[in-house]
Image (cartoon, coloured by chain):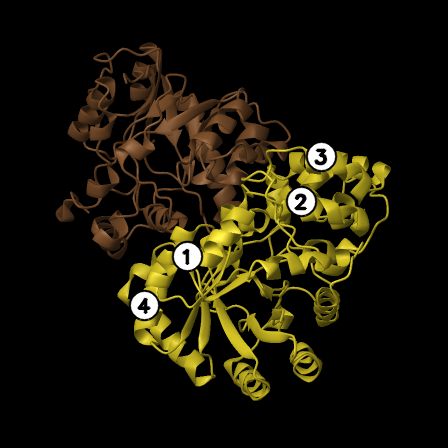
Amino acid sequence: MSKNIPTNFMMPFFPEEEYGWFAHDELMVFGRAGNDFQSSCALFSHPNTRNMSGDDVLRLRKAGADVCYVYDMIDLENREFTREGFRAVNADLTRAISQGFTHILLSNAYLIELVCNEYAKDLKIVGSSLLECNSERFKVFFDALNDDRAVSHVVVSQNQMTPKKLKGLKKAFSDKKLVIEADRWTSDIQMVHEHYYNMAYGYSSDDAVEELERFAADADVLQHVKTPEQVWQDDPNFVYKFGEVNVSYEVWRKNVQKALAGQSEQIEIIDHALWQVLDREAK
Amino acid sequence: MTRFCMPYNGDQKIIDIVSSDYTDHVASFYGSVGSDPFGGGRALKNAQQQTLGSLRRIISHLDKKGIEFNYVINNTNMMNRECSHEYREQFRQFLLELQSAGVRTVTLSNISFIAFTKEVMPDWKISASVNLKTRTPEEVRFLVSLGCEEITLYYSVLKDVKALKQIRAETDIDLKLIPNDVHVMDCPWQKGHTRMQGAHSRKKEFTTPYFSYYRNKCVSLRHVKPEEILKAMWIPPDQLWRYEALGYDYFKLLDRLASTEWNIRALDTYIQAKPCNSLERVLGTYGAATTKETPETVAGDASPYPREKLEVIPSISSEKASDTFSFFLDKKHPSPCGRCSVCSKAVDSIVEFSEEARMQAIENNRLWRSTITKPSFIESLEGGSKRIQYE
């Protein structure tokens, strides 16, 4: 059976990339904006993480892309509620707007509420997969906001996803674009998924990176990680997200090519290698 | 025979009452010394803080009565501290201290700590926390493979008879259900809420404020959509028998933050297993609030969480609710729950709200939410913990 070829994408930022080698209807480029309140996060401290300057953002926007600020460290240990933390977060948001970012990827519920209440005219929100949106029930999350119109996209969580649940999700979220992560670590053993992501979005340290490296290569764990065939959702109406702020260019490009060629089963789960390719000297 | 696991709220009285009058019903207590270096799912009040010495006396007393004490370390995110040798060594020392206090059962929610604890304390019973979200036979198998000998299942299974049957068929170990938390079905705030509690309950070098941000989410939702009370993952006392018929006879009652009087009353209500119209009597969330008065306007209120203006308490007609709750475990009930309109149709005749109070609360919540993202609100949180107090 032939596969639908995706045309709507979320792609990671690469400084020299023009994103013109593949056809697309919609393109959103995501990346980091340098030092901010979430710089202590293990994933964002990865030495391969590429930060975007204001010029980068402008270049991408001139080329017709939306540009998304990756800010989805979910657990801030309640520091977002301190005077200093709140000020720092607001300073990051203000800077992102002045740099021209159009979207922000968020997973912390309070920060989503903050952007919905205070920054809706300048920023749209992409709800992170860390929110675990994988059924129509997730709609209640938005019922408890004063105004959720700033949330334009939601990244679907594929843990314990079923075709029936996905169908319900599409119906329930007709006012938002659903994003499928094509190459990420998901598991039907929820605690395996959460353990990995807790570490990836925890504080950075050499010990944490070593543990991430060990966990991501543990055969007992890997048997519970979904294969690309289980993850792929064949529907051109979705937005397909490839890569991460620190994925290697070669792996990203190869994965996109496989998807465009209808060979989604050959997509590489990027998390397997993410922590093993670290240049220890670069840390 | 129905068994209950009771919350230890830091009050010696609850130990005395249960060990004197309820030994036929209560198989265990769960709790902690309050704030410890690793954190748990509840941030206890200062008055509830205990020492290892008092814990030792409690465990010794309970041992004589044949009641187990389960020490809870179910912080859902240690933010990678657990990866360091120093922190693991600190954890090992803490386990040894707990051992000297008589602890032999521990509830954990971090899978690397489960393996580590099994290594350090091979004879201990490890109980998997509800925060691990165990809801499939595969997840049960995974936890058993890690060495867990007891699991508190995730709330989502309570209205999924197929999952309940499959999981029960998977293992003979104790599987506990929590019947008295009005947990939002497939709660989208669970992850953030448990992490907020975990961070707050951990002893640390810096202080952060706490306010009832996540609590307010489900409270608000139930005002706007009263059917969520029926959809929520709780079991009325007169419906426990349906779960026992499926092989689930061990129930963990909340709430560690509630008073001894309230906890004993909830236990009594579940033992009696009769219809109960008063939600405050069994559900910790509602038991925390004490007023049914019409909320006044919230504008201008100085309190970070003016509970009396944001929350109204409904009651339910248990007799009318019985049919609806029985349907949850009927083979015709769709799985996952939420794909039929039974709750929506039944809610008007089962859930009784003061309509005026409900509408005022909805408006108050809307106003309150518009303030919580302002600098002035954050400044009002300075000075430590600001949260609702359970009476």
* Secondary element at image label 4: helix
Residue at the spot x=54%, y=73% of the render?
B33
- What colour denotes chain B? yellow
Q: Position of residue B20 (x, y in %)?
A: 69, 84
Residue at the spot x=37%, y=57% of the render?
B141
Q: Which tag, 1 or 3, sits closer to the chain's start?
A: 1
The residue where tag 1 is placed is B140
Would residue B311 appear left or right of A283 to someone viewing this image? right
Q: Amino acid at mark 3?
A: Ser
- What colour denotes chain A? brown
CA gap, disc 1 and disc 4 = 19 Å
Q: Which tag, 1 or 4, sits closer to the chain's start?
A: 4
Q: Position of residue B306 (x, y in %)?
A: 73, 48
The residue where tag 2 is placed is B327
Q: Nearer the viewer, residue B88 or B263?
A: B263
Q: Chain of mark 1?
A: B
